């Protein structure tokens, strides 16, 4: 491999995870922005119980 090919591969391997994180983050923010507050509360409450974290 040439130096140019190595630089190209290194750049792609750094950009793809960052791009995935940005898309995932925007998706989460968009979904939570359009969901009813009670639905978010119920989901968080269910996760707490599923992981054994006391919440009451």
Image: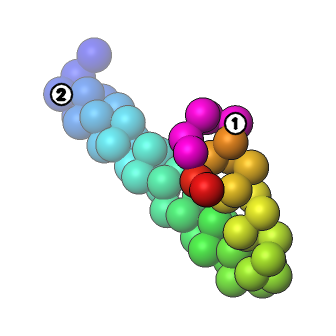
Residue at the spot of label 2: 3
Magenta residue check for 26? no
Quadrant containing the N terminus is: top left
Does residue 8 appear in this view? Answer: no
Which residues, given as a range, are shown in magenta? 50-54
Residue at the spot of label 1: 50
Residue 33 image position (x, y, % from top left): 69, 83
Asked whether the residues under the numbered discs 1 and 2 touch, taking CB atoms below 8 Å apart as contact, a structural biologist would say: no
Left or right: 48, with 17 as reference point? right
Residue displayed at 73% across by 69% down: 40
Residue nearest the observer in this picture, 28 or 49: 49
Most common secondary structure along the magenta stretch: loop
Report the mark closest to the observer, 1 or 2: 1
Residue displayed at 18% across by 28% down: 3
Residue 53 image position (x, y, % from top left): 55, 41
Residue displayed at 79% across by 77% down: 38
Furthest residue to the front?
A: 56
Q: CA distance from mark 1 to mark 2?
A: 50 Å
Q: Is residue 42 above or below residue 5?
A: below
């Amino acid at each position: 491999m040439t130096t140019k090919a190595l630089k190209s591969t290194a750049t792609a391997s750094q950009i793809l995870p960052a791009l995935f994180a940005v898309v995932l983050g925007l998706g989460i923010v968009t979904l939570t922005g359009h969901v009813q507050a009670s639905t978010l509360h119920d989901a968080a409450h269910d996760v707490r119980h599923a992981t054994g974290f006391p919440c009451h």
